[in-house]
Amino acid sequence: MNVIYNGPYSNVYREDKYAVKKVDRDFSLPPHNIDRELQLVKSLDHPNVIKFLKVENKLDDVMMYMEFYPQNLQEYLKANCRKKSRFVVGQVSFVTESRLSLDSIAHVLDQVIEAIWFVHKNGIIHRDIKPSNFLVTQEPELRVVLCDFSISVAVGENDQISDVCSTYYKPLEVIFGLEYGLEIDVWGLGIMISHLYSRSCTNTLFEEEDINDGYRAISDFKIIDRIFKRFGTPTKDDENSINYWPEIFEVENFQLIQLNSRPRQLDIFPRGTDEKMVTLFNRICDMNQKRRIAMSEVRDRWTQIREGSS
């Protein structure tokens, strides 16, 4: 078997037309739970969700057989970038530009939204929505599927661990240890949309030093900093915002460093020119989890936008 991925909790191999995920139970630590993952993936049947085929147990190892896809969405986006200029002034890197048309982006987003909506409809919180957890094939046509349910959980299950969501796909309610639900996946979708519609092939929350570091050692403080810079600082006038960190509003200097509460739209949604799409994006990326739109409404509004553009 050829190795596709080596990780701290699992390895993924290719065996003929299958992807085989190998999990050693001895190294499966919370929030990872292989038994729960198996139970969840067996219950899901949708063209935009990875298809579970079979499971084998070998000593302490669990072998999950699934459909094989040649790349993930992160790799697909990177493959559809081109160098715009040779170097960034003062940095050892290239300036890149996305080659994906708005129609191509919308076709990807059709399937991403369908996948998350279906998972939520079945009462499951994925808890790690990001481009690398969507797999892509272009044969015979572009197909995108959601994968990796290793830290997913059923709605209502008593598992509010905060070690979920990756780097900039992590919403404030997780960072501040608040109770969360399906809305954390909606936030992840919003950051993905910002990435998809970026002109420079990178997530607009990321900055150059983060990209060069590979997003590895990014603290929650840095994530908060990036969110506030892109979406604005929670204000004292918004009673719901105070719930995140009530003590901070009593710090005198905090009032002096308030960032723009209405940042420029082009900074976070560079290629979003459709007014209805911008409105939907703002509802998805509401920092307040209580106001954040649900996936059922995201799907309905996105369908209306797509029908209006055809």
Image (cartoon, rainbow, N blue to C red):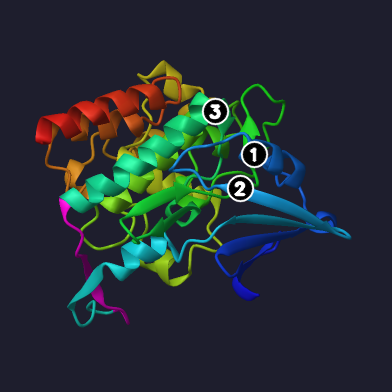
Which of these two is toward me, 114 or 242?
Answer: 114
Q: Specify the quadrant of the image occupied by residue 80.
A: bottom left
In the image, residue 251 above or below residue 136 = above
Q: Tell me if 249 is positioned left or right of 17 in this view.
A: left
Q: Amino acid at mark 3?
A: Glu
Give yes or no for contact between labels 2 and 1 (Cβ–Cβ under 8 Å).
yes
According to the image, label 1 marks what residue?
42
Q: Which residue is mark 3?
A: 247
Q: In this view of the protein, can residue 73 be seen by the observer? A: no
Sort mark 2 into few (<14), some (14-19) or many (20+) by Cα contacts within 10 Å.
Answer: some
- The image's mark for residue 52 is 2
Magenta region, residue range? 91-102
Residue 240 spot, x, y in % from top left: 44, 19
Callout 3: 10 Å neighbours few (<14), some, many (20+)?
few
Q: CA distance from mark 3 to mark 1?
A: 44 Å
Q: Nearer the viewer, mark 2 or mark 3?
A: 2
Say what amino acid the circle numbered 1 marks: Lys
Secondary element at image label 1: helix
Q: Circle 1: is it few (<14), some (14-19), or many (20+) Cα within 10 Å? A: few
Q: Is residue 240 visible?
A: yes
State the CA–CA distance, disc 2 to disc 1.
6 Å
Q: Amino acid at mark 2?
A: Phe
Marks 2 and 1, the one that precedes in the sequence: 1
Residue 73: give x, y in percent of width and height.
40, 58
2 or 3: tag closer to the N-terminus: 2
